[in-house]
């Protein structure tokens, strides 16, 4: 578990509620037109646009992880509280923010059949493939 | 009797030399003769051809030491060597183990050498380029391209492999920089990422990459098993840009097939505006990088859905970020037979643009794989070569081949003193670096990668930086062109500089993605 994930998991406001509903780790994409400029300048634009979004998320018991801001993707990670999650997403969408759940998927485009991890010497190929 | 002499002489001429002499005879102008000789034989000196004069076979005697054998062969070669050197003024090099002599001679001198009795065979000694990463290089005519443009190795071009990690311990790979945006460190490389990197930058003698001297940047965005989140990939694109990448090679993606289907990711990208596609479009528009991206391997899965009456669930087979307007999206085809791979995703995109943009070999591609590890997790010492290379198939494998070719084009443009933009490289590849292929454009795009006809770039005084730097110039204009990749990649160039295409506000469709597209 990475430090950031642990931090998220330990945040009191974001623990599962009494109904065992979990807070959602999501990405928020800011649908704004960026003005031309350096990456740093575009980052500043995005942070400015992010401020009201972060305030909204915080208001509803969540948190935007600003250190994860991606300038190219106009993207930032956030944790949305389970309580009122649907309403939070609706409000974000109204502000032109795309919300995606963070899920881990098999994203490579080929070659998986041959095994993807470095093989361990001494194991048969079949055993390595099953790892 | 003259006929007998001719027959005897013709038997002395080796097959390669015979073909070349026939070609030279058919040429009339000296310039052509020089060009043909230089290109076909690798001769450094005009019409003088490198040839080997065989003086028969003389095997070592049983238990004969090398020194004694060498002295015996030297004595046998000596008189002929001195006679040729004195008679024709040629530099003659003995090849002891072959009982032969090596000279560079013009066609007239070769005719005279045929009359030398001890010489049993005269064969061309062509310059052989060991560019045999895989037979895929034959399909893309790499040797022909490099013969016309010698010295193209990708040197000075920074290529980021955004994938599951590259094994820096592999003896054929030199990783200049490495960064990870996923849960794992770069020290746990993926087989997929290492394979893709090798197709571009392997420095192995027998399995070199397309552009072995590129500066390789390992951007690990997926775990070694190929799994990861879209945010890893987006942040990886940022990291590649921070490190000054000129070309992004991206063989990963999220498909838009329903999650309940096998391998379906349930990703949603209506108009090329998902985070993955926006990251690519912004990177190309603002940061002047070329993004070469896999089309995806979803055709068979999509066909299965269609055959079972679920065609409506297949909105597009192209995966994101290959779905982006400014991506150079690559499909896969078989080697030699040039058939579209049955897994290679077909277009169009969800917003109606034909993709993939081109196809390249992507079936049974041999490239590097991670060095086997011991139980302590460390690479084993001196592993067998057979375990350092493997074959894989996918649009993933076609993508780095195109990225490597693009690196050569970038180097070629730089060497010609031209500034370049991603649109320039794509234009060069698509107008002169493709061979037509009989298939629908939504299957193979504008054709298959073939560098045979990609000629030199004339210096462009108006666009030259003058210092040979790789910085791109001002991007082209016309952001409104959303058609083919060249036009789609054009950037609005006003006095204020380039602008990305307007990103649409995300409305109900996004709500659909958030509520309906994900499993509870």
Image (cartoon, coloured by chain):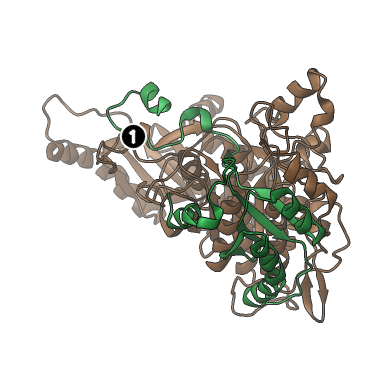
Q: Please, which residue is most extreme toward the front here?
A: A18
| Residue B341 can be seen in this image | yes
Q: Counting other residues with Cα less than 10 Å from the Cα at mark 1, is it few (<14), some (14-19), or many (20 or more)?
A: some
Residue positioned 29% across, 32% down in the render: A121
Q: Quadrant of the C terminus of chain B?
A: top right
- For this rendering, which residue is in front, B75 or B369? B369
Residue B82: horizontal and vertical position, in percent?
30, 49
* In this rendering, position of residue B155 left or right of residue A83: left
Secondary structure at numbered mark 1: loop
Residue at the (19%, 40%) spot, across then down: B70
Q: To which quarter of the image does residue B376 belong? A: top left
- Residue closer to the observer: B36 or B245: B245
Q: Is residue B501 above or below residue B17?
A: below
Q: Nearer the viewer, residue B381 or A29?
A: A29
> Which quadrant holds residue B457?
bottom right
Q: Is residue B437 left or right of residue B230?
A: right
Residue depicted at x 62% and y 76%? A40
State the image coordinates of residue B274 (x, y, percent, origin top left).
Answer: 73, 52
Q: Is residue B15 above or below residue A33?
A: above
Q: Give the colour in which the image draws chain A.
A: green
Q: Nearer the viewer, residue B312 or B47?
A: B312
The residue indicated by pointer 1 is B55
Residue B114 in view here: no
Q: On what subunit does the disc labeled 1 rest? A: B
- Residue B507: x, y in percent? 83, 53
Q: Which chain is brown?
A: B
- Figure disc tally: 1
Residue B56 appears at what percent x and percent y?
A: 33, 30
């Amino acid at each position: 578990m990475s430090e950031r994930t642990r931090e998220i998991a330990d945040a009191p406001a974001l623990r599962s509620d009494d109904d065992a509903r979990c807070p959602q780790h999501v990405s928020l994409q800011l649908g704004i037109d960026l003005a031309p400029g350096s990456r740093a300048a575009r980052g500043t634009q995005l942070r400015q646009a992010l401020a009201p979004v972060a305030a909204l998320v915080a208001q509803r018991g969540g948190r935007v992880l600003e250190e994860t801001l991606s300038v190219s993707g106009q993207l930032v990670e956030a944790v949305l509280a389970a309580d009122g999650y649907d309403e939070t997403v609706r409000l974000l969408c109204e502000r032109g923010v795309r919300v995606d759940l963070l899920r881990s998927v098999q994203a490579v485009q080929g070659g998986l059949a041959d095994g993807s991890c470095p093989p361990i010497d001494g194991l048969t190929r079949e055993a390595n493939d099953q790892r | 009797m003259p006929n007998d002499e001719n027959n005897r002489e013709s038997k002395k001429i080796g097959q390669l030399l015979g073909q070349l002499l026939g070609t030279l005879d058919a040429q009339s102008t000296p310039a052509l003769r020089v060009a043909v000789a230089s290109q076909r034989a690798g001769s450094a000196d005009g019409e003088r051809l490198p040839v080997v004069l065989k003086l028969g076979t003389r095997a070592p005697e049983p238990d004969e030491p090398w020194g004694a054998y060498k002295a015996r062969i030297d004595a046998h070669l000596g008189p002929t060597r001195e006679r040729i050197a004195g008679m024709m003024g040629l530099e003659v090099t003995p090849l002891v183990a072959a009982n032969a002599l090596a000279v560079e001679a013009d066609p007239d001198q070769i005719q005279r050498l045929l009359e030398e009795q001890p010489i049993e065979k005269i064969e061309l000694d062509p310059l052989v380029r060991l560019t045999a990463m895989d037979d895929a290089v034959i399909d893309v005519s790499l040797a022909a391209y490099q013969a016309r443009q010698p010295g193209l190795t990708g040197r000075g071009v920074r290529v980021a492999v955004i994938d599951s990690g590259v094994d820096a311990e592999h003896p054929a790979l030199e990783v200049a920089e490495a960064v990870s945006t996923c849960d794992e460190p770069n020290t746990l490389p993926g087989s997929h990422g290492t394979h893709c990197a090798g197709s571009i930058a392997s420095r192995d003698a027998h399995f070199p990459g397309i552009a072995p001297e590129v500066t390789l940047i390992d951007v690990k965005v997926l775990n070694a098993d190929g799994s990861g989140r879209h945010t890893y990939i987006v942040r990886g694109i940022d990291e590649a840009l921070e490190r000054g990448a000129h070309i992004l090679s991206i063989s990963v993606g999220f498909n838009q097939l329903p999650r309940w289907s096998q391998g379906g990711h349930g990703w949603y990208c209506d108009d090329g505006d998902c985070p993955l596609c926006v990251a690519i479009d912004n990177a190309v528009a603002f940061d002047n990088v070329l993004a070469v991206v896999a089309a995806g391997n979803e055709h068979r899965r999509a066909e299965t859905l269609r055959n079972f009456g679920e065609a409506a669930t297949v909105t597009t087979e192209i995966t994101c970020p290959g779905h982006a307007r400014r991506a150079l999206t690559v499909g896969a085809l078989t080697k030699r037979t040039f058939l579209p791979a049955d897994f290679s995703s077909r277009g169009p995109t969800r917003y109606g643009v034909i993709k993939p943009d081109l196809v390249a070999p992507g079936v049974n591609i041999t490239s590097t794989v991670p060095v086997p590890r011991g139980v302590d997790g460390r690479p084993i010492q001196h592993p067998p070569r057979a375990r350092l290379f493997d074959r894989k198939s996918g649009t993933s494998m076609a993508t780095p081949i195109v990225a490597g070719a693009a690196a050569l084009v970038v180097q070629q443009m730089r060497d010609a003193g031209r500034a370049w933009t991603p649109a320039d490289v794509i234009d060069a590849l698509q107008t002169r670096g493709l061979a037509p292929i009989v298939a629908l454009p939504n299957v193979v795009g504008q054709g298959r990668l073939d560098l045979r006809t990609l000629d030199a770039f004339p210096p462009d005084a108006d666009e030259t930086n003058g210092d040979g730097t790789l910085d791109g110039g001002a991007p082209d204009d016309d952001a409104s062109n959303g058609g083919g990749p060249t036009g789609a990649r054009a950037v609005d160039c006003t006095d204020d500089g380039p602008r990305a295409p307007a990103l649409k506000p995300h409305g109900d469709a996004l709500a659909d993605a958030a509520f309906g597209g994900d499993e509870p």
